[in-house]
Image (tube, grey):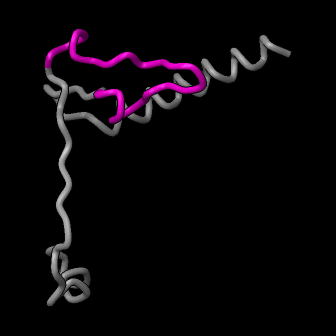
């Protein structure tokens, strides 16, 4: 929002809401149950974050890849 081209677009605008995230820093015990019938929690929803290195995007992408591979494997076994 401070880039000259972007700030020109936002000039005079009004913030209508704010957002925030809660970080799970309690280790394995603070991660919620990740699977449920018909779905799973991955990425930010699951609370995956390397808080030491502040790497949320990396863990979100990797957990999505691993979930997709596991789901694909399970669907292949059903056929």
Residue 61 vs 48, above or below: the answer is below
Q: How many labels does the image show?
A: 0
Q: Position of residue 2 (x, y in %)?
A: 14, 75
Q: Where is residue 10 in the image (x, y as percent from the top left)?
A: 21, 83
Q: Which image quarter: residue 50? A: top left
Q: Which image quarter: residue 18? A: bottom left
Tell me if 68 is positioned left or right of 6 in this view. Answer: right
Residue, far front = 37
Q: Which residue is drawn at 38% across and 16% down?
A: 33
Tell me if 41 is positioned left or right of 49 in this view. Answer: right
Residue, far right = 79
Q: Where is residue 35 in the image (x, y as percent from the top left)?
A: 48, 18
Q: Position of residue 57 (x, y in %)?
A: 33, 39
Q: Which image quarter: residue 11? A: bottom left
Q: Give the range drawn in magenta.
A: 26-47
Residue 79 vs 56, above or below: the answer is above
Quadrant containing the N terminus in the rendered view: bottom left
45 in magenta:
yes
Residue 42 vs 13, above or below: the answer is above
Which residue is nearer to you in this view: 14 or 71?
Answer: 14
37 in magenta:
yes
Q: Residue at x 17, y 32 (%)?
A: 23
Residue 34 vs 4, above or below: the answer is above
Quadrant containing the C terminus in the rendered view: top right
Q: Residue at x 69, y 16 (%)?
A: 73
């Amino acid at each position: 929002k401070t880039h000259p081209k972007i700030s020109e677009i936002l000039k005079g605008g009004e913030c209508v809401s704010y957002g925030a995230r809660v970080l799970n820093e309690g280790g394995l015990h603070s991660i919620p149950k990740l699977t449920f019938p018909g779905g799973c929690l991955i990425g930010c929803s699951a609370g995956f974050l390397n808080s030491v290195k502040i790497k949320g995007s990396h863990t979100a992408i990797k957990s999505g890849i691993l979930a997709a591979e596991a789901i694909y494997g399970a669907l292949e076994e059903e056929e």
